[in-house]
């Protein structure tokens, strides 16, 4: 079971709940960064033995345009749902190639103000 999500920033909390099922059940979701520009960080570790490709710490850093964080709370419920679904769609395209020892285990998702369109 994924750990409970405890985030201070209401927008990050909503987005995290929208994304939670896309990640392994043992993943942690944390709020990182400065209070003026908070971000989400989802992290987990794959099993395996030390120095083996399967034993890797993985992470996704969601960076938000400040305009998204400012506008989101003022959007109607259906518009907030659309924002969450757009961020979710961005997340579906992430490639976690656990078998490739050269795979990038840290991915960054930049959430720009274009997620507010619609």
Image: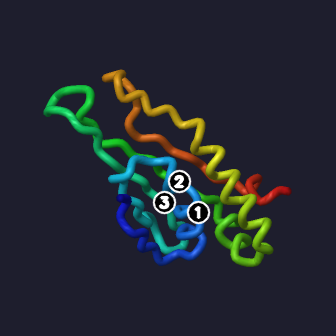
Q: Residue at x 42, y 73 (%)?
A: 6
Q: Is residue 45 above or below residue 77?
A: above
Q: Which residue is mark 3?
A: 40
Name the residue at the right extreme: 118
Q: Residue furthest front?
A: 1
Q: Is disc 3 surrounded by few (<14), some (14 to 19) or many (20+) residues within 10 Å? A: many
* Residue at (47, 77) in percent of width and height: 8
Q: Residue 44, relative to residue 117: is it above or below?
A: above
Whichever of callouts 1 and 3 sits on the residue coming sooner in the sequence is 1
Quadrant that contains the N terminus: bottom left
Secondary structure under the numbered disc 3 in the rendered image = strand
State the separation of the CA atoms marked 2 and 3. Answer: 5 Å
- Mark 1–mark 3 CB contact (< 8 Å): yes
Residue in the image at 35% along x and 23% along y: 99
Q: Quadrant of residue 70?
A: bottom right
Q: Which quadrant holds the C terminus? A: bottom right
Using a 10 Å C-alpha cutoff, classify the residue at mark 1 as few (fewer than 14 neighbours), some (14 to 19) or many (20 or more): some
In percent of width and height, residue 61 lies at 47, 51
Work out how far the residue at label 1 is from the one at label 2, CA to CA, in angstroms.
10 Å
Judged by depth in the image, the label closer to the viewer, 1 or 2, is 1
Query: Which label belongs to residue 62?
Result: 2
Identify the residue under disc 1.
Answer: 15
Mark 2 or 3 closer to N-term? 3
Please give the label number shown on residue 85.
none
Horizontal side of residue 39 vs 4, given as left or right: right
Contact? badges 1 and 2 (CB < 8 Å): yes
The percent coordinates of residue 13 (x first, y second) are 53, 70
Instruction: Give yes or no for contact between labels 2 and 3 (Cβ–Cβ under 8 Å).
Output: yes
Quick one: label 2, few (<14), some, or many (20+) residues within 10 Å? many
Residue 18 x %, y %: 58, 59
46 horizontally vs 73: left or right: left
């Amino acid at each position: 079971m994924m750990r409970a999500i405890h985030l201070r920033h209401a927008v990050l909390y909503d987005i995290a709940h929208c994304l939670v099922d896309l990640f392994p059940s043992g993943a942690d979701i944390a709020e990182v960064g400065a209070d003026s520009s908070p971000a989400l960080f989802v992290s987990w570790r794959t099993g395996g033995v030390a120095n083996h490709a399967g034993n890797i710490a993985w992470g996704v850093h969601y960076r938000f345009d400040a305009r998204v964080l400012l506008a989101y709370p003022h959007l109607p419920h259906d518009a907030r749902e659309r924002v969450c679904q757009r961020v979710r769609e961005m997340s579906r395209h992430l490639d976690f190639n656990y078998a490739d020892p050269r795979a990038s285990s840290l991915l960054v998702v930049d959430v720009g103000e274009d997620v507010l369109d619609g």
